[in-house]
């Protein structure tokens, strides 16, 4: 009777939930230690003790970052840590070459100009033209330059030319002489200047009228002119250079008279072109001293 009653009671109460958890999960009973459970592994006494002197896994990974299984890390190298070849030559800045400014320069050479075209007449019946009273200067000139401040110079010039116009043009005057003073700016390779010229002609200014005979015309040149010129310098030595220059010459005034006509008053627009050989009479001492102090290429290596 009693066993049947117990069986009925177990049937009404339901199955015990602990019967399905197994030995690993057992409900804590009153009085049990709450810090310990049946599923917690206790340290095995038979396992060997950890060696405190042995390197840890993190230390081994840091010592060998490329070991298998370790994460890849990017190493940042500072510029100061890079190696520098001691044999590499140091980088030197290019020295600035000072432009020489000699205090005193003398120059001279051949010159062409000034030029006057003359009077021209053409006749259709004869199918030709004649030009009389021409002038084309060809001669020499010389100048002396003195430095005022850096590239600014003053100069004085003297020139003398003869009339190289052909005889078929009935040339006027045998030649011209002049002196001038001016101001110029001179760099190492180029220069420009402006000057005043005082000129005087020698010889006769008379000429024959085109298609006529006899000295019937006269050309009277005054004595004042202006010159604006530019040029290029080609250094050939420490104190010598070749200069090619040329410019526009305005003047002198010309009063040309012909019988039966009003005087023709004009200012001659003409030119001067020359080649000079210049020489530094007094060289630039500061530039020479700087050139001596500047190390040569062979010594700098």
Image (cartoon, rainbow, N blue to C red):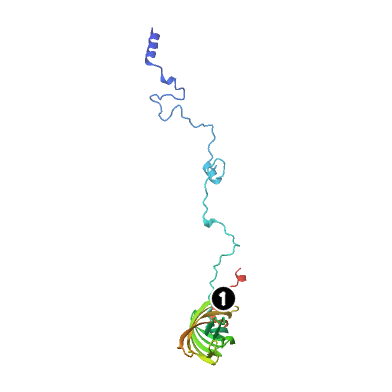
| Residue 54 vertical placement versus 265 (above, below) | above
Nearer to the camera, 295 or 1:
295
Quick one: which residue is furthest to the top in this view? 1
What is the x, y in percent for residue 112? 56, 83
What is the x, y in percent for residue 296? 60, 72
Which of the 4 quarters of the picture holds residue 279?
bottom right
Q: Which residue is drawn at 52% across and 56% down?
A: 79
Quadrant of the image containing the C terminus:
bottom right
Nearer to the camera, 255 or 177:
255
Quadrant of the image containing the N terminus:
top left
Can the viewer see residue 192? yes
What is the x, y in percent for residue 59? 53, 44
What is the x, y in percent for residue 299? 61, 71
Secondary structure beneath label 1 = helix
- The 10 Å Cα crowd at callout 1, few under 14, some 14 to 19, many 20 or more, is few
Q: Which residue does the numbered mark 1 point to in the structure image?
A: 293
């Amino acid at each position: 009777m009693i066993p049947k009653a117990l069986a009925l009671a177990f049937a009404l109460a339901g199955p015990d939930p602990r019967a399905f958890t197994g030995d690993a999960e057992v409900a804590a009973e009153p009085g049990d230690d709450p810090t310990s459970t049946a599923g917690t592994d206790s340290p095995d006494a038979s396992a060997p003790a950890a060696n405190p002197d042995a390197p840890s896994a993190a230390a081994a990974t840091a010592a060998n970052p490329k070991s298998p299984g370790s994460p890849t890390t990017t190493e940042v190298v500072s510029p100061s840590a890079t190696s520098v070849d001691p044999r590499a030559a140091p980088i030197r800045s290019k020295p600035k070459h000072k432009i020489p400014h000699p205090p005193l320069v003398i120059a001279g050479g051949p010159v062409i100009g000034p030029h006057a075209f003359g009077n021209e007449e053409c006749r259709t019946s004869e199918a030709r033209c004649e030009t009389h009273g021409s002038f084309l200067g060809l001669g020499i000139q010389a100048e002396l330059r003195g430095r005022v401040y850096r590239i600014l110079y003053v100069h004085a010039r003297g020139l003398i030319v003869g009339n190289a116009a052909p005889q078929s043009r009935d040339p006027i005057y045998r030649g011209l002489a002049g002196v001038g003073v001016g101001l110029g700016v001179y760099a190492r390779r180029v220069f420009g200047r402006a000057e005043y010229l005082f000129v005087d002609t020698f010889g006769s200014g008379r000429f024959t009228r085109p298609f006529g005979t006899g000295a019937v015309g006269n050309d009277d040149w005054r004595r004042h002119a202006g010159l604006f010129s530019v040029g290029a310098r080609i250094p050939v030595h420490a104190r010598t250079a070749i200069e090619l220059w040329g410019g526009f010459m305005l003047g002198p005034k010309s009063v040309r008279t012909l019988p039966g006509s009003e005087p023709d008053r004009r200012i001659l627009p003409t030119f001067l072109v020359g080649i000079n050989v210049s020489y530094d009479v007094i060289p630039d001492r500061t530039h020479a001293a700087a050139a001596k102090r500047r190390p040569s290429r062979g010594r700098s290596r």
